[in-house]
Image: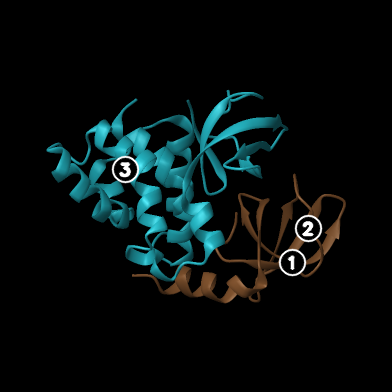
Chain colours: A cyan, B brown
């Protein structure tokens, strides 16, 4: 998978918050959605601008790994391993975040326990159950392990 | 579409909830979970994904709207 595509699939669920803050409009959000669903690479500069908060956090990780911020290993290290620590420690904008927001913002590994037309029902952690949209991983089925971020299943593992 | 802040359920008909955000109202589908009138919830792409305890609603709005 291209790093731009990998990045956007994980970052797209956050675009709702970016739109809420008025930094992108409805049209730009739909463009992000289409690119995320169809696995189309958007220009790196554009993604770095829209998701600058993510890159503030990815940069030091890249430096530590002595790799580029767009190296897929760096992006994976961020979204799968470091992202949750950053949230849990309350760094950056998460300092004031309530627990339910932190929990939705974290990337969890989850098991698909039910599939319906709009959503997957997944179970993660210790018996937590929630619905997530399946449009980023339409092939996911009951029994699969997926990563989830906010209201979306992101990647089938 | 959806809003990134909690909204309040003001009507439930079957699996369809009407959610009030103060400035506007939206509809969203309940696919899982026990939700009732008055609950504050987060919706994404027209699906109710999570209930937000009343004590956390204010800080949600603050973090989402004011974060730098």
Indicate the secondary structure of the residue bearing disc 2: loop
Disc 3 packing (10 Å; few <14; some 14–19; many ≥20)? many
Expressed as whole percent of the image width and height from the top left, the position of residue B36 reads 81, 62
Q: Which mark is residue A78?
A: 3
The answer to whether residue A58 is left or right of residue A124 is left
A60 left or right of B60 in image: left
Q: Disc 2 marks which residue?
A: B35
Q: Are marks 1 and 2 in contact (CB under 8 Å)?
A: yes
Element class at badge 3: helix
Residue A74, horizontal then vertical, whole percent = 25, 37
Q: Is residue B57 above or below residue A65?
A: below
* Residue B39: image tag: 1
Kindly tell me whether residue A41 is visible in this rendering.
no
Asked if badge 3 and badge 1 are on a common chain, one would say: no
Residue toward you, B20 or A57: A57
Q: Residues within 10 Å of mark 1 (few under 14, many from 20)?
A: some
Identify the element where label 1 is drawn: loop
Q: Residue at x 26, y 32 (%)?
A: A73
The spot of residue A127 in percent (x, y) is 65, 42
Seen at 52% across and 54% down, the residue is: A103
Could one spot residue A121 in this view of the protein?
yes
* Nearer to the camera, B14 or A156: A156
State the separation of the CA atoms marked 2 and 3: 34 Å
Q: Residue at x 56, y 60 (%)?
A: A100
């Amino acid at each position: 998978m291209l790093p731009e595509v990998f990045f956007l699939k994980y970052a797209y669920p956050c675009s709702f918050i970016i739109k809420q803050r008025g930094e992108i409009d409805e049209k730009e959000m739909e463009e992000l959605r289409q690119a995320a669903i169809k696995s189309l690479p958007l220009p790196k500069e554009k993604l770095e601008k829209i998701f600058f908060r993510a890159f503030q956090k990815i940069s030091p990780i890249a430096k530590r790994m002595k790799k580029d911020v767009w190296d897929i290993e760096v992006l994976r290290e961020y979204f799968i391993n470091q992202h949750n620590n950053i949230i849990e420690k309350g760094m950056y904008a998460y300092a004031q975040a309530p627990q339910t927001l932190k929990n939705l913002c974290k990337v969890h590994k989850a098991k698909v326990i039910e599939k319906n037309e709009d959503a997957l029902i997944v179970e993660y952690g210790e018996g937590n159950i929630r619905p997530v949209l399946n449009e980023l991983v339409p092939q996911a089925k009951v029994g699969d392990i997926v990563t989830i971020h906010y209201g979306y299943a992101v990647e089938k593992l | 579409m959806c809003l990134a802040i909690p909204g309040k359920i003001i009507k439930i008909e079957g699996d369809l909830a009407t959610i009030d955000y103060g400035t506007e109202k939206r509809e969203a589908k309940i696919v899982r979970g026990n939700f009732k009138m008055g609950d504050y919830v987060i919706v994404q792409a027209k699906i109710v994904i999570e209930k937000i305890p009343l004590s956390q609603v204010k800080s949600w709005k603050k973090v989402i709207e004011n974060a730098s």
